[in-house]
Amino acid sequence: MPLRKRTPLVALGAVTALAVLTACGGGDGTAAAPGADGKPVDLTFWGWAKGTKEVVDAFNASHTNIRVKFEEIPSGNAGGYAKISNAVKAGNAPDLVSIEYPMLPEFVSQGSVQDIGALLGDDVKKKFLPQAVELTTLGGKNWAVPFDAAPQAFYYRKDLFTKYGVDVPKTWDEFRAAAEKVKKADAKARIGTFFPDDPTTFQAMAWQAGAQWFKAEGDTWKVNTTDAATTKVSAYWQQLLDDDLVRNNASFSPEWTNSLKSGGTVGYLGAAWGAGVLKGTLPEQEGKWAVAPMPTWDGRAASGMLGGSTFAVTKGSKKASASVEFAKWMTTTEAGIKARIASGTSSAFPAATELRPAAKKAFDATYYGGQDIYQVFEEAGTSITPNWAWGPSTGTTNSVIKDQFGRVTGGGTTIADAVKAGHDATVAELKKRGLKVEG
């Protein structure tokens, strides 16, 4: 079931503005064909996604013309992006790096990655769902190889939902009612968590609600992080926090993990890749978790994207051809997908639609009681809400919102004010870069 065709995330009218954005992009993606001199090409690759080491090991074991040296770095928002940026500036960056969709425009605008369109080819791009290609195409150029899609999903402790008599919520109104019921059944338990350190989770929920934070028209960026959809999501989560119906813990922190271990938190609003995270983090809870579609505002299926990764060639790399060959193997071959998912820590939902059956087969669903979780992801993927685009200053946007979200606890600020601060900082940053902005 491929994702349905939908409105392009970057409209044709945006070409002029995106041309400004991509003017600094480096390289033409034609250097260093693999094995051109008869010797293996040695690549360096930085990333953090689950199962990556196993993928690299499998590639090196099956290829002689390219050898990959992998270095695991912190996830992007935990310092990985800063490490990549600093390495590019210092001239000692690796050849290939992991970059999530939201941050790709930022790296393109900084001139940190190469246009790889000539190496990717239309035959390869056709393998990926159109939305993933749109998110990696700026100014008519291809800047990265898509890896996965990341539709939203709701993970819940089915044993505790049964014990507390809680129905799996289909709407956000039902989610609040379920949150109240969980708390009433166990005063120490909560249905989920607000992540103050992770604006992308909030953004995915705004996306699901129909928000459109960035829009390029002509030579102008239109910025609006305080539209009606976002305002609705902000008010909803503020009320959940004010009424102590959800936790306020940093994502994947010891506090969050311990609350899951103890049954103090019985749900997780995440994405397709979250299935592997829970499985790897809480192996002792095998058989207790299940996956459901995200609650929606009107009960009809709708999803945003929470993260999702791409592979980009850095500005200074002279091994673009070999890097893209390796990236294509990771993203478009059954061997690449199987190596990652067979690690037992990844539940990647491939952007290459024909690989979904291989991913499903490779994932051991015993942890989820044998549930066909990939069918949940497929259905969520078909409902990804159209018209969302990422802007060229996502780093600034997210940094400011993250800082402000950290002040929400204790009444230091509100979610709405935090998002407004991100809006103002974004507009100021784009003007600083000499771009035309409305917002």
Image (cartoon, helix red, strand yellow):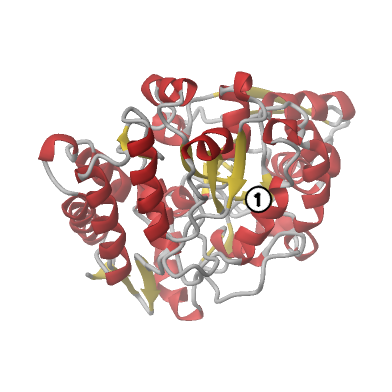
Note whether residue 82 is visible: no
Is residue 328 toward the left or the right of residue 149 in the image? right
Is residue 173 toward the left or the right of residue 120 in the image? left
In front: 390, or 431? 390
Is residue 231 toward the left or the right of residue 207 in the image? left
**Residue drawn where x is 37% and y is 67% of the image:** 211
The image shows residue 138, relative to residue 85, as above or below, that is below
Disc 1 residue type? Val
Give residue 17's position: percent from left, percent from top: 39, 71
Q: In the rendered image, which quarter is residue 282 located in? A: top right
Note whether residue 233 is visible: yes
Q: Provide the residue designation for mark 1.
A: 145
Within 10 angstroms of label 1, few (less than 14), some, or many (20 or more) residues? Answer: many
**Residue drawn where x is 65% and y is 53% of the image:** 377
Give residue 32's position: percent from left, percent from top: 73, 40
Mark 1: secondary structure = strand
In front: 351, or 321? 351
The image shows residue 265, relative to residue 104, as above or below, that is above
Q: In the rendered image, which quarter is residue 413 located in? A: top left
Residue furthest left as drawn: 412
The image shows residue 290, relative to residue 7, as above or below, that is above
Total tally of numbered discs in the picture: 1
Give residue 434's position: percent from left, percent from top: 25, 62
Give residue 16's position: percent from left, percent from top: 42, 75
Is residue 265 toward the left or the right of residue 344 in the image? left
Which image quadrant: the C terminus? bottom left
**Residue drawn where x is 22% and y is 44% of the image:** 243
Which image quadrant: the N terminus? bottom right
**Residue drawn where x is 58% and y is 65% of the image:** 134
Q: In the rendered image, which quarter is residue 388 located in? A: bottom left
